[in-house]
Image (spheres, rainbow, N blue to C red):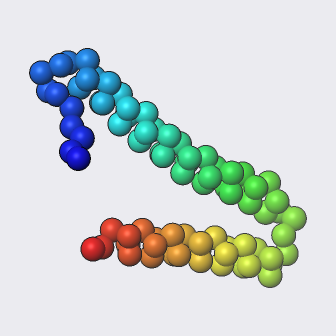
Amino acid sequence: MMLNISLANPFEVLLAAVFVIVAFAVLVGSVVLAIAYVYSNVFERWPEYTRAKRFQVSRNIALTVAVMALVLWLASRR
């Protein structure tokens, strides 16, 4: 079964475009919100951390970013 929209109907084209824009905005918004959450938590507590704790937090953030990059890279390959 093939799903497609009729280009002859401008309402269907507009509806499809709006749906794609909303879906993309939700995806980008969730990523930005996650980054902002981590940044705000680290920024608030950074002065309280010892040198070892700062290294641990930085290492964990870097490791998380590296794992996410690896997963995205593997998912983008066929």
Outermost residue on the left side: it is 8
Please state if 45 lies on the left or on the right of 11 as rendered: right
Q: Quadrant of residue 55?
A: bottom right
Tell me the quadrant of the picture where the C terminus can be found.
bottom left
- Compare residues 43 and 74 and report the one nearer the observer: 74
Q: Residue at x 82, y 59 (%)?
A: 45
Q: Percent from the top left, x then y, of residue 18?
A: 35, 28
Relative to 34, residue 22 above or below: above
Q: Residue at x 41, y 41 (%)?
A: 24
Relative to 48, residue 56 above or below: below
Q: Residue at x 72, y 73 (%)?
A: 57
Relative to 33, residue 38 above or below: below
Outermost residue on the bottom side: it is 52
Q: Percent from the top left, x then y, of residue 72?
A: 42, 68
Q: Quadrant of residue 14?
A: top left
Count of numbered circles in the view: 0
Please state if 30 lies on the left or on the right of 3 as rendered: right
Q: Residue at x 67, y 75 (%)?
A: 60
Relative to 35, residue 64 above or below: below
Q: Percent from the top left, x then y, of residue 43?
A: 74, 56
- Compare residues 4 and 48 and report the one nearer the observer: 4
